Image (tube, grey):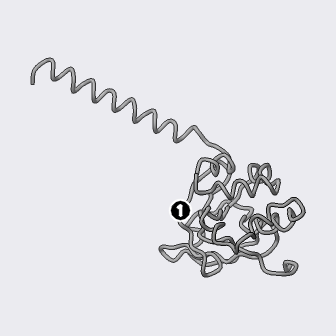
């Protein structure tokens, strides 16, 4: 190998190693909270807007959570006009009830869902979650598409808006 070629190969190897170490460092030190993580995912922009309209952003950034975030397509599949009505100020409480049904107040990984348990959500109702290698099913029919980890939450993208049962939650 010529000296010129050896210098070029050494440079490429050194550059690659420095880039890889920078990536690994960024992955281990750039932790962002739940809402900042959700904002990075284009397919969650409607969810982010709904959380902000409900005034739940600060709550979801403080505490450990499992969040089942409906994708933009999931919101688009709601009956015509339903999302627009939910985003009206006079419907804020209903929006909060729906969004908090998507949040379990503990951080759960895929392994936690293997046994198929019911978990109490922030709104007090139970949500059944089962990992069936794949998919992860929520209430037996809603599929988890992918997930993102935040510093304080795991966000699972779901293909439907999960509507809470009518009535008060059981204690």
Examine the image and state in which quarter residue 161 appears.
Answer: bottom right
Residue named by callout 1: 146
User: Which quadrant of the figure contains the N terminus?
Assistant: top left
**Viewed as shown, does residue 125 lie left or right of 26?**
right
Residue at position x 67%, y 61% in the image: 66
Q: Residue furthest right?
A: 90
Q: Is residue 45 above or below residue 77?
A: above
User: Neighbour class for label 1 at 10 Å: few (<14), some, many (≥20)?
Assistant: few
Q: Position of residue 79 (x, y in %)?
A: 70, 75
Nearest the eye: 131 or 46: 46
**Viewed as shown, does residue 56 lie left or right of 152?**
right
Residue at position x 82%, y 71% in the image: 124
Q: Position of residue 95 (x, y in %)?
A: 81, 65
Q: Residue furthest front?
A: 80
Q: Mark 1 falls on what kind of element?
A: strand
User: Which quadrant of the figure contains the C terminus?
Assistant: bottom right
Q: Is residue 88 above or below residue 128?
A: above
**Viewed as shown, does residue 161 lie left or right of 91?**
left
Residue at position x 86%, y 62% in the image: 92
Residue at position x 59%, y 70% in the image: 159
Nearest the eye: 90 or 21: 90
């Amino acid at each position: 190998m010529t000296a010129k070629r050896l210098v070029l190969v050494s440079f490429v190897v050194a550059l690659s190693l420095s880039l890889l170490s920078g990536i690994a460092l960024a992955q281990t030190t750039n932790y962002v909270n739940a809402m900042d993580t959700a904002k990075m995912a284009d397919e969650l922009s409607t969810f982010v807007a709904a959380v902000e309209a409900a005034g739940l952003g600060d709550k979801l950034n403080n505490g450990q959570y499992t969040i089942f975030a409906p994708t933009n397509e999931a919101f688009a599949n709601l009956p015509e006009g339903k999302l627009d009505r939910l985003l009206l100020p006079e419907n804020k409480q209903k929006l909060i009830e729906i969004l908090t049904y998507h949040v379990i107040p503990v951080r759960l990984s895929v392994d936690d869902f293997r046994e198929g348990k019911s978990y109490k959500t922030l709104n007090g109702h139970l949500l059944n979650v089962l990992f069936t290698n794949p998919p992860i099913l929520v209430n037996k029919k809603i599929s988890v598409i992918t997930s993102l980890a935040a510093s304080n939450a795991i966000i699972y993208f779901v293909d439907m808006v999960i509507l809470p049962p009518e009535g008060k939650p059981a204690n």
